[in-house]
Image (cartoon, grey):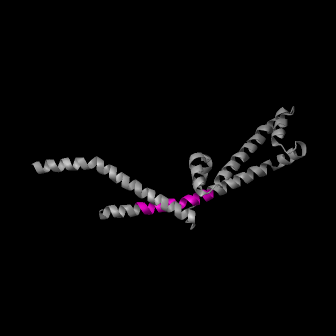
Amino acid sequence: MSKLQHYLSLVVFTLGFIVGIQIPNYLDQYAKRVDARLREAGDHLHGYQLIADRNHGGSLDALLERHRQSIDETFRAEAPVIERLIVQKQLYQREQNALELGWFRAVGFLVLRGNRSLMRETWRQYSTGIPLNTQAVVAAFLCAALACVLLELTAWLLGLIFRPLFRRRRRDVTDV
């Protein structure tokens, strides 16, 4: 391995480590955003839940249906608002439940099924940090190792592609 390859490997490892250590930090900030949204949706639904508790055995669905069937246009107009709040609360609750399955599974959930708009919002307001916990160190080493493996694979593939060209060129030069 040449010195250049060695230094390039060190740089790639370091960059992979820095990126990897941010994964649990991003996940934490995303989880806090989900929790805040869940609480907000719950706060907005609180008054409706009290009405449902008093008049519909606690069923928000029954309250929603009552609004939909009302002869009063004001109550019918409230139905989509209530429904949107119910759906949002359920969505944030599912997100929160998935994030509580452990950090590795939470990262998988985020990559495959995470709320894209919340992910973008978290990224826009992301603040870097270096958490010193087991998850951050493991994620950092995994990303660093993956980055190094990808570098080696790239170098190997480039060698497969370009090595025959250099051999042919050397033969042509020595034949002259």
Locate the N terminus by quadrant.
Answer: bottom left
Q: Quadrant of residue 87?
A: top right
Judge from the rendering whether residue 154 lies leftward or rightward of residue 120; answer left or right: left
Q: Residue furthest bottom?
A: 132
Out of 5 and 156, give the one closest to the viewer: 156
Out of 61 and 36, give the one closest to the viewer: 61
What residue do we see at 57% from left, 60% from top? 24
Out of 16 and 157, give the one closest to the viewer: 157
Judge from the rendering whether residue 88 lies leftward or rightward of residue 22; answer left or right: right
Q: Residue furthest left?
A: 176
Q: Position of residue 161 (x, y in %)?
A: 29, 47
Judge from the rendering whether residue 148 lies leftward or rightward of residue 123; answer left or right: left
Q: Position of residue 22 (x, y in %)?
A: 54, 60
142 within the magenta span: no
Q: Position of residue 112 (x, y in %)?
A: 57, 46
Q: Position of residue 120 (x, y in %)?
A: 58, 50
14 within the magenta span: yes
Judge from the rendering whether residue 146 lies leftward or rightward of residue 79; answer left or right: left
Image: magenta residue range:
12-29
